[in-house]
Image: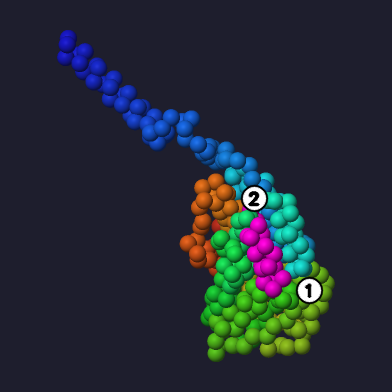
Amino acid sequence: MFRSRRRAIGIALLMILPLILAACSTTGGKKAAQGGSSVAAGHANTQRYTIAMITHAAPGDTFWDIIRHGALAAAAKDNITLKYSSDPDPTKQAALIQDAINSKVAGIAVTDPNPAAICPAIQKAVSSGIPVVMFNAGVANWQQCGGMSYFGQDESIAGVAAGKRLATAGAKHVLCVLQATGQVQLEARCAGVQKGLGSEGTMTKVYVNGTDNAAMLSSMTAKLTQDKTIDAVITLGAPVALVAIQAISSAHSNAKLYTFDTNAAEIAKIKSGAVQWAVDQQPYLQGYESVDSLWLYLTNANILGGGQTVLTGPAFIDASNVAKVAQYAAVGNR
């Protein structure tokens, strides 16, 4: 009888002990009330901060919708109020940075396609005590501008990778289509393509107005009609690639089409074979990490990257993986 009682007590203790240990581990040895801020059910209960995201997005460029999706997802998780603004004119983009400084936001995430115009405004934000992270454009100068971290791809590395793939595909004369002038990241892409091609081929550049589809179509069609030696076209944005499909057809060109960046419509063109592949810098990640890194700094003094660029690309989307990516592109995240 006594053995049975001792056995019952022992079993009861074994059942209770894991519950006691679990209770200790969830509070880190402290009472829950002393634990400070925490994240519950994927949503922070930290102080609500306002963060400004300022980009050089041109009207109608769907690439930036993907960045905003990532930024908004991080903002929702981190209890952040996100103020997004953009202007493709570097002087006006610098003015937007000044507006953010004046409104005393808690942090700024910004692109820098034109260092001469934008870097001084970034430095002013930093000197005002506002933490700044940079993303997408400005990989060569983000530290000089005072950015804490940079999220994006090194456009020179991405260009070289694309050029090497073009050379492997047998391209001999590549037309690199730039949708804007004076943007360092676009120039770096084309220069990288030329370097990656090496002695296997040559590259020609053409500048188009990325905000005017009719003008883009006219410029690309004229170039492809004029020079039939062009056997490959690489565009530097997904919306431009969609227009290039029409240009190649209108010019009765045999050139194959490749591109940087993606959107849902362009992913469908990779599936159909109209576009061979896309260089993917994963813009959702850029938006997400820019906001999330500022939250980490504001709430825990964390800085990502260790003083180095945090690379989000290049990755490649082609026939081998487009079906997987397409399901996320359909909801605007790739």
Q: Is residue 23 left or right of residue 181?
A: left
* Residue range corresponding to the magenta coloring: 106-128
Q: Tell me the quarter of the image containing the N terminus.
A: top left
- Going by the numbered disc 1, the residue's amino acid type is Asn
Numbered badge on residue 16? none
Query: Which residue corresponds to the image point at 69% horizontal and 64% vertical from the top-left?
Result: 121
**Three-letter code for the amino acid on which mark 2 is drawn:** Ala
Horizontally, residue 170 falls left or right of residue 110, namely left
Q: Residues within 10 Å of mark 1 (few under 14, many from 20)?
A: some
Q: Residue at x 63, y 55 (%)?
A: 130
Estimate the spatial distance between the alpha carbons at disc 1 and disc 2, rounded to whole Å: 35 Å
Q: Nearer the viewer, residue 161 or 115?
A: 115
- Depth check: give the residue in front, 208 or 169: 208
Camera-nearest label, 1 or 2: 2
Q: Secondary structure at mark 1?
A: loop
Residue occupying the point 41% across, 32% down: 30
Residue with the mark numbered 2: 106
Membership of 109 in magenta stretch: yes
Question: Residue drawn at (63%, 79%), measured in percent from left and top?
Answer: 190
Horizontal and vertical percent position of residue 114:
69, 72
Up the image or down, 213 lies above or below 104; here it is: below
Tag count: 2
Label annotation for residue 209:
1
Give the quarter of the image for residue 186: bottom right
Q: Is residue 222 magenta?
A: no
Sooner in the amino-acid sequence: mark 1 or mark 2: 2
How many residues crowd around disc 2 within 10 Å: few (fewer than 14), some, or many (20 or more)?
A: many
Q: Is residue 315 visible?
A: no
Q: Are marks 1 and 2 in contact (CB under 8 Å)?
A: no
User: In the rendered view, does 59 fall on the left or right side of 289?
Assistant: right
Tell me residue 73's x, y (percent): 62, 48
